[in-house]
Amino acid sequence: MEKERLQKLIAESGHCSRRAAEELIKSGAVKVNGRSVTLGDKATKNDLITVNNKKLDFSQSKRYIKLYKPRGYTTSMSDSHGKKLITELLKGINERVYPAGRLDRDSEGLLLLSNDGDFTNMITHPSGKIKKKYRVTIASIVSEDIISRLSSGVNIGEDGERELTAPCEVHVLKHDKTETESGTRHRTVLEFTITEGKNRQIRRMCKAVGLDVSRLKRTSVGGVKLGMLKPGEHADLNEKELKLLGAGRK
């Protein structure tokens, strides 16, 4: 059996993501056949690999799940200072799954989870160029100039730092206006299609061009959609959805 990098093996076991595995190795929590290891070391599934003195289990089946994350929940698998966690929504799932990407607490929509580290890495790493669609509600008119600026890429860096987003697709889905005693109120719904996954990217992009987001919903990832899921519900990905994402081939 050919040896593989330890972070890859740890991710395949479903213990955590590949990036998290790298941190575990650096911290000295990982041993192979009783010996401490360093980042870059290799092993096989026949070796005794332990994390914090607990043996890795390679026997569990792979699980691929889509969840409709409601607003108000934090994309975290452990205690987050009293905040509502997505783990509260994963009743009936015995495998140790973790999210492939994040949605901030005030956002909602599609979140993928799995115990397949390679799958998670493929979804989250920029090189995968997985398309993610978002439905974004803005409480104002959005001009063609702003649409063009968002599509071309904007600087979302803070404190003078430059962090330019890659070109993306931005379209106006609808525009409503309502007459009130205080004047005319406008509401514009945009659809963003991006392949990056920077922290709070959509919100930061809108802020950079002077737009206030009143609602943000992720509607699809790599062609996989929410379907009939209601907020808080989850379902296993079907064969067609797995093929869309290139998962479950091992």
Image (cartoon, rainbow, N blue to C red):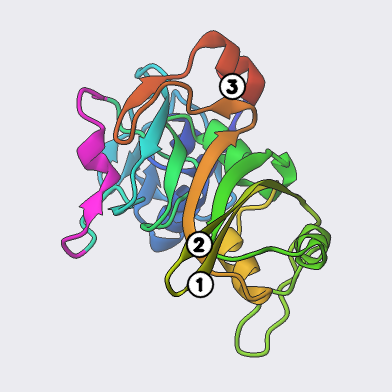
Q: Closer to the camera, 56 or 63? A: 63
Q: Which residue in the structure is indicated by mark 1? A: 183
Q: Closer to the camera, 217 or 118? A: 217
Give the magenta range. Answer: 81-94
Residue 218 screen position, x and y as percent: 52, 43
**Does the magenta portion include 73?**
no
* Kind of element beneath mark 3: loop
Residue 164 screen position, x and y as percent: 75, 70
- The earlier-in-sequence mark between 2 and 3 is 2
Q: CA distance from mark 2 to mark 1?
A: 6 Å
* Quarter occupied by residue 161: bottom right
Residue 88 screen position, x and y as percent: 20, 40
Q: How many marks?
A: 3
Amino acid type indicated by mark 3: Ala
Q: Which residue in the structure is indicated by mark 3? A: 247
Q: Which residue in the structure is indicated by mark 2? A: 179
Amino acid type indicated by mark 1: Gly
* Quarter occupied by residue 235: top left
**Which quadrant: the N terminus?**
top right
* Kind of element beneath mark 1: strand
